[in-house]
Amino acid sequence: MSSKLTVCGVCEYLNINKQSVVWCSECNEGLCEVCKVHHSASKGTRSHSIVPISEYQNLPSNILENTQTCPKHDDKYVIFCKKHDTPCCRRCVTETHNDCKEIDVIDDVIQNVKSSNAFLEIEHSLAELSGNLQQIIKDRQENIKSLIENRAKIEKEVQQTRNLINNHLDKLQENLIKELYAAEEKESTKIKNILSSIQEKERTISGSQTTLDRIKQHASDLQTFLALKHIQRDVTNNEQFLESLIKEEKMNHVSISWKNEKGVEILPTTIKKMGTIILDSRSGDATLINRKNKQAQITLPITHVPAIDDITLTLRQTVKTTGYDITDCTLLPDDRMIFTCYGNSKIQVLKIDGTLDFTLGPGFITYIHYIEESQTLAVTAGQFSQRIKIIDMKNRKTEKSICVRSMMYGIVHKDGKLFYNGHKGGLCVLNLEDDSITQLINVPLSRFSSIAIWSDKLYFINEDNAVTCCDLQGGIKWKLELDAFLREPRGITVDNYGRVYISGYTSNNIGVISPDGSKHRLLLSDKDGLKSPQTMCFDRKNNKLLVANQLNDAFLYEVSK
């Protein structure tokens, strides 16, 4: 294209190599100074519009590469077909557009195109888009700036909080030390006063002993008799003094110790962190202009939720399970399948083709949930063990075992919490951060039944043969009795639209319930190979439904809307 622009098309045709100085878009070729004069004077071309070659070369490359002649027939465009929205040469019209009725002469179509409403609309739309993009860039940059300011402010407040705590603890320590010294001084003063009195009595006794020795050697009997009476009074007084020391507990041994205040004693264990960082999201300040809709803001479309009548299941694979009494199943991100074998006390991990990859166990196993974030498997043990195990799937070892003191069946995970079927204990929550357990719903749940989670909702099977939907705080959203179409429900799972799939163990069928719990429909029955279906798992990434019978067979379905 560059060589075609710089060489005069007329001269090139005459095998003369001359530099072009202008470009004729209608002739689609460059012209030298001489040919330019002839081109402007000729009756057939004098009306053509020409531009300097330097200005034409400034057009974007994708515009320059657009051919103005039919690439198929190398002929000039003369017609525009509105039906096919394409320009046509004469041969195109004859060959492929002969039956088209909405055709116009291309010269009429392109006439005044640069001042047309379509051109102006595109021009305005591009300006509008550019303005909106600049507005969004500015808004996002301001958001980054505000985040930095928020972080700096919080960092300062955290430090101030730490200083307040430190100052308060320093004050408490100072007061306690003062109290300690005061207690020591008080008791030491008491003991010193007692010592002073005892030492005085000791000096008196020592003097009496000296006097008695001298009397014995030199005094007469009368003098001795009279002196003994006096000394006897002193001895009696001193004996009474010693007895008073014991009686008044002045000889008790005093020691100093200390005990934490109750709040201080539990402070290190109760306070896990100084605070919580909260991310708050609100509508952005950027207002986008939309001339066509005359709206100040752009509204996102509401996602259509297909009805349960739109669901179609296509069997893609039948899997042979070898364990006895399959109670639960799940699909890993790499499409491997996991089955729990209650009768064999093992977990089977199968490859995509259904062959065995490896097993985990032994140990009592009822239900499982794969936690993708940590690549671990949460395992419950029914009625025989009151512990939930967390198994690292990479090294295939138990990394944690938590006692819950109740029966456990179906289990799911969300945001660091395990929600599990505690049977008579209701729907329970185990916080993996501190292993604390709370009861979310105080209603007996069905034994040997799963629970499911989707968005901010939980789904569980009641002991009275009904399925219940609640929020993560335990608020009931809806409840549906199942007796009319399904018996002894056990497996439950939810798809991407909140449609609930549930299996009937003794009715040998699979039903689906609308997101609001108002409608239901049967999807599979014993005619599809179901025989005591105990468990199901919906793969939301690939729209697949895995259904497992109690024995022998599991089925992998593709779910279409």
Image (spheres, helix red, strand yellow):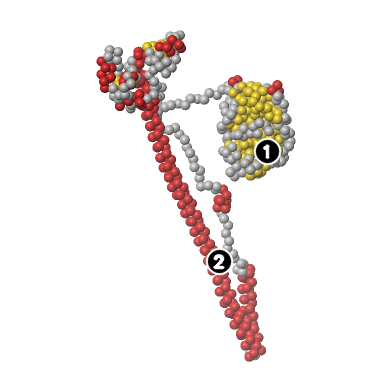
Residue 64 at what x, y percent from top left?
37, 24
**In the rendered image, which quarter contains the N terminus?**
top left
Residue 359 at what x, y percent from top left?
69, 38
**Circle 2 sits in a helix, a strand or a loop, which is it?**
helix
Decide which of tag 1 and tag 2 comes sooner along the chain: 2
User: Which of the numbered marks, if any, corresponds to residue 358?
Assistant: 1
Mark 1 neighbour density, 10 Å: few (under 14) some (14–19) many (20 or more): few
Q: Type of residue at label 1?
A: Phe
Residue drawn at (62%, 40%) of the image: 376
Q: Quadrant of residue 365?
A: top right
Q: Type of residue at label 2?
A: Glu
In the picture shown, does residue 42 fall above or below 272? above
Residue 282 at what x, y percent from top left?
45, 34
User: Which of the numbered marks, if any, corresponds to residue 92?
Assistant: none
Identify which residue, 457 or 343, lies in the foreground.
343
Number of marks in the rendered image:
2
